[in-house]
């Protein structure tokens, strides 16, 4: 179990945790320290994410073949699967699943439902509403930022026992410096930055503004966090959708096969 998971379990016991984990209060409140509940959330997140991705792609004008490929491309990304340290106690996958459902509501003309869902996603992970806004290419989803804003006003961060560890305390106190030191010598490592995208790299051919901006925002997270692949994977829906729209329909099945199976163990963190 990784340090993030340990913090969520500590929060599940109704103890205070350090920033920004104190903003991610919903799942610790629901699941507590009960691993069975965390496993149930983790398992339910996969069909929710897959179904949401399919319906979102359809709502954005994709054919059923393109929507199916978009779904397969997204759920197979190493960053979406994540490392063992966040399974099942983690927030990225559940937050992405709920965020994708919010995107479905928005693109299909249900803004009130979308607002509710994006607020829920914002209670799971504070950055989720930003990415929903990028996926649907509309600022309306930024209403979800009210969730972490209110949480920041109501809940106070506390130095939890996990963050108090000297190494993690250094990361907490100096996130930018820690992020740079953690990736020292790896800024041009294709196995870290390029390979995890798999076939979705096709999206970069003639990339539109939404794809470029989403990728930039996703990668900006790397300047303040030591994780990489599971953070930038938040650009996955846009990359998957663009790639599925670019690859000829007759080649999509082959593209999915090449993408879904990892040719060697990829970076997951």
Image (cartoon, rainbow, N blue to C red):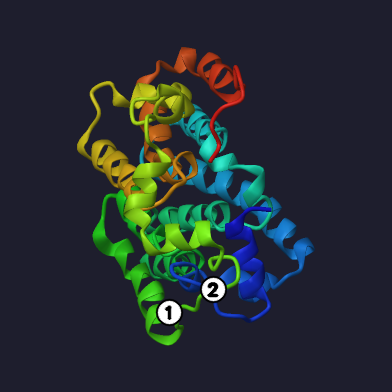
**Separation of residues labelled 1 and 2 (CA atoms):** 8 Å
- Horizontal relation, residue 20 to residue 217: left or right: right
Tell me which residue sits at (42%, 26%) in the image: 200
Mark 2 burial class by Cα count in 10 Å: few <14, some 14-19, many 20+: many
What residue is disc 1 on? 151
Tell me which residue sits at (54%, 14%) in the image: 254
Mark 1 burial class by Cα count in 10 Å: few <14, some 14-19, many 20+: some
Q: Nearer the viewer, residue 133 or 197?
A: 197
- Picture coordinates of residue 265, whole percent (x, y): 61, 25
- Picture coordinates of residue 257, whole percent (x, y): 59, 18
Tell me which residue sits at (49%, 73%) in the image: 22
Depicted 250 relative to depicted 127: above or below? above
- Picture coordinates of residue 92, whole percent (x, y): 53, 53
Residue ranking furthest to the left: 209
What residue is disc 2 on? 25
Say whether disc 1 or disc 2 marks the residue closer to the N-terminus.
Answer: 2
Depicted 158 relative to depicted 214: above or below? below
Tell me which residue sits at (50%, 27%) in the image: 65
Depicted 236 relative to depicted 15: above or below? above
- Horizontal relation, residue 74 to residue 47: left or right: left
- Picture coordinates of residue 81, whole percent (x, y): 59, 40
- Horizontal relation, residue 207 to residue 188: left or right: left
Disc 2 element: loop
User: Could you say which quadrant of the image residue 187 lies in?
Assistant: top left
Q: Are marks 1 and 2 in contact (CB under 8 Å)?
A: yes
Q: Nearer the viewer, residue 62 or 262?
A: 262
User: Could you say which quadrant of the image residue 219 lies in?
Assistant: top left
**Residue 88 numbered mark, or none:** none
Depicted 208 relative to depicted 25: above or below? above
Q: Nearer the viewer, residue 230 or 48?
A: 230
Disc 1 element: helix
């Amino acid at each position: 179990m990784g340090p993030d998971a340990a913090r969520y379990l500590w929060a599940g016991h109704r103890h205070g945790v350090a920033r920004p984990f104190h903003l991610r209060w919903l799942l610790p409140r629901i699941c507590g320290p009960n691993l069975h509940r965390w496993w149930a959330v983790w398992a339910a997140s996969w069909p929710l994410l897959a179904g949401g991705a399919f319906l979102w792609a359809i709502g954005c004008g994709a054919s059923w073949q393109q929507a199916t490929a978009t779904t397969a491309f997204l759920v197979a990304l190493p960053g979406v699967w994540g490392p063992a340290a966040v399974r099942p106690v983690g927030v990225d996958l559940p937050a992405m699943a709920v965020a994708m459902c919010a995107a479905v509501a928005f693109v299909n003309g249900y803004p009130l439902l979308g607002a509710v869902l994006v607020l829920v996603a914002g209670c799971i992970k504070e950055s989720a509403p930003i990415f929903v806004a990028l996926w649907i290419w509309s600022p309306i989803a930024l209403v979800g930022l009210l969730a972490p804003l209110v949480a920041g006003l109501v809940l106070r961060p506390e130095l939890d026992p996990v963050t108090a560890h000297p190494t993690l305390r250094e990361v907490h106190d100096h996130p930018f410096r820690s992020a740079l030191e953690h990736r020292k010598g790896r800024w041009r490592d294709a196995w870290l930055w390029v390979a995890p995208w798999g076939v979705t790299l096709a999206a970069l051919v003639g990339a539109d503004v939404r794809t470029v901006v989403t990728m930039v925002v996703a990668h900006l997270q790397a300047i303040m966090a030591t994780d990489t692949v599971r953070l930038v994977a938040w650009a996955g829906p846009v990359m998957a959708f663009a790639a599925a729209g670019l690859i000829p329909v007759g080649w999509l099945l082959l593209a999915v096969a090449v993408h879904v199976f990892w040719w060697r163990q990829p970076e997951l963190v």
